[in-house]
Image (spheres, grey):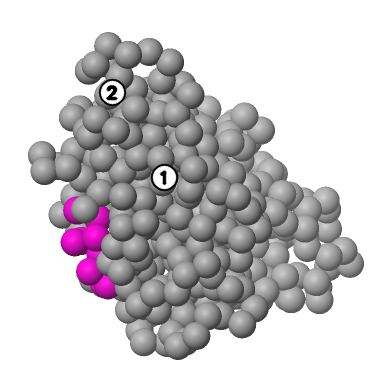
């Protein structure tokens, strides 16, 4: 009971609505007035390197997105954001994007690398799990419905001396919940330390690679009981496997895939069996299949509103002939769309990872453009 009380007190969010998969009805509040002829296509936008660089809009993205709404500000073209990034809830990310881009964006339109973790709640709802990454990884997982989740910051704080470099990390000024006096409970510490970690979720990019690799190796090679004998590896899930991505710095930055390579290399050197893991995110076909379902549901919702207004029926037969993926990373966005096949059409921008004059030699897009604004202009002219 001590652990449960701690989790209730420490958690910022206890809204455990299942957001995945999303029902058609969940899109109904996006638009109340739309065009009389629903679009026969949908668009999936990557974010970093396409829509934003850091927190700055790029490539005419605000103007491009405004063209997907009618004059009253209601959505008329079904689109979603399909990103391998994350660390915050879909609702928080939607609010942030809305402010930065000047249009209303629903949480239902935001698909992040960790969004598929919603589907694993039934397996790990009451099990002890650890969430890794920048932002609010434990809060994200708690919102998805996980009831016994700790961030790696909080979990590591229960084990004295688990990070031998901690005294030298002067940049680390944030106290974890346990380090705060309100949570210094010996019974709670013993409770957490005696429970097996059943799964680890890499929700977003690791902030402290040295500490996280050390602690994860301790968890994964001991059967979820750091400091004990070698045991069966708990399950490990990565939200994505990007080697690099485009951030505010001119050159690409190392992503979650780089962290996975580092963790795997160390683990395989110190453990008799190779590291086992599951990676989500683009270019995984699962992600594009899910995006297709969401875009069709969004389009059907818009179509449903039209038919309600005109007293027509049979709205469930609405079909999207083309789905456009606009991305900056050939090996992730373009490769994923091409793997998914029909009805996906891939568009590669030059504002992020890709900066070449010609098409990418290995992962060739259906179209190469300079900016997302140019991509949207092409789509609307083609579909008009």
Q: Nearer the viewer, residue 62 or 160?
A: 62
Residue farthest toward the right in the current orientation of the protein:
272
**Span of residues in magenta:** 57-66
Along the horizontal axis of the image, is 38 left or right of 149?
Answer: left
Residue 130 in view here: no
Q: Nearer the viewer, residue 345 or 174?
A: 345
Snapshot quadrant of residue 63: bottom left
- Residue at (39% x, 74% y) in the render: 369
For the residue carrying disc 2, how many other residues have a C-alpha within 10 Å: few (<14), some (14-19), or many (20+)?
many
Residue 365: x and y in percent read 54, 70
Q: Count the marks: how many?
A: 2
Q: Is residue 64 magenta?
A: yes
Q: Is residue 43 above or below residue 333?
A: above
For the residue carrying disc 1, how many other residues have a C-alpha within 10 Å: few (<14), some (14-19), or many (20+)?
many
Between the C-alphas of marks 1 and 2, the distance is 17 Å
Q: Name the dominant secondary structure of the magenta segment.
A: helix
* Residue to which mark 1 is pinned: 41
Along the horizontal axis of the image, is 320 left or right of 262?
Answer: left
Viewer-side label of 1, 2: 1
Q: Are marks 1 and 2 in contact (CB under 8 Å)?
A: no
- Residue at (63% x, 53% y) in the render: 340
Q: Secondary structure at mark 1?
A: strand
Snapshot quadrant of residue 212: bottom right
- Residue at (51% x, 32% y) in the render: 21
Q: Is residue 307 above or below residue 159?
A: above
* Residue to which mark 2 is pinned: 305
- Residue at (61% x, 61% y) in the render: 338
N-terminal-most mark, 1 or 2? 1
Q: Secondary structure at mark 2?
A: helix
Q: Is residue 279 magenta?
A: no
């Amino acid at each position: 009971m001590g652990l449960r009380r701690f989790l209730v007190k420490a958690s910022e969010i206890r809204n455990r609505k299942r957001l995945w998969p999303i029902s058609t009805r969940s899109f109904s509040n996006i638009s109340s007035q739309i065009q009389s002829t629903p679009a026969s296509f949908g668009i999936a936008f990557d974010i970093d390197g396409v829509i934003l660089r850091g927190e700055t809009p790029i490539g005419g993205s605000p103007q491009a997105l405004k063209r997907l709404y009618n004059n009253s500000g209601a959505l008329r073209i079904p689109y979603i954001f399909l990103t391998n990034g994350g660390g915050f809830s879909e609702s928080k990310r939607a609010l942030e994007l809305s402010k930065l881009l000047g249009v209303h964006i629903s949480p239902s339109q935001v698909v992040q690398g960790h969004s598929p973790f919603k589907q694993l709640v039934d397996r790990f709802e009451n099990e002890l799990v650890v969430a890794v990454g920048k932002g609010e990884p434990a809060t994200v997982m708690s919102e998805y419905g996980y009831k016994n989740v700790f961030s790696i910051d909080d979990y590591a704080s229960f084990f004295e001396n688990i990070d031998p470099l901690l005294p030298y990390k002067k940049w680390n000024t944030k106290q974890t919940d346990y380090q705060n006096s309100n949570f210094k409970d010996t019974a709670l510490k013993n409770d957490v330390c005696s429970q097996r970690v059943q799964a680890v979720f890499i929700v977003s990019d690791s902030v402290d690679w040295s500490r996280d690799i050390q602690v994860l190796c301790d968890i994964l090679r001991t059967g979820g009981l750091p400091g004990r004998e070698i045991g069966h590896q708990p399950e490990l899930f990565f939200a994505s496997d990007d080697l690099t991505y485009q951030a505010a710095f001119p050159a690409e930055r190392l992503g979650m895939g780089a962290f996975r390579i580092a963790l795997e290399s160390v683990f395989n050197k110190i453990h008799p069996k190779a590291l086992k893991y599951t990676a989500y995110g683009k270019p995984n076909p699962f992600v594009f299949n899910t995006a297709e379902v969401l875009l069709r549901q969004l389009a059907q919702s818009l179509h449903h509103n039209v038919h309600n207004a005109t007293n027509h029926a049979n709205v469930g037969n609405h079909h999207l002939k083309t789905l456009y993926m606009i991305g900056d990373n050939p090996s992730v966005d373009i490769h994923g769309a091409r793997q998914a096949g029909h009805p996906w059409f891939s568009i590669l921008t030059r504002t992020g990872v890709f900066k070449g004059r010609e098409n990418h030699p290995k992962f060739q897009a259906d179209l190469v453009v300079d900016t997302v604004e140019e991509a949207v202009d092409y789509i609307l002219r083609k579909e008009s």
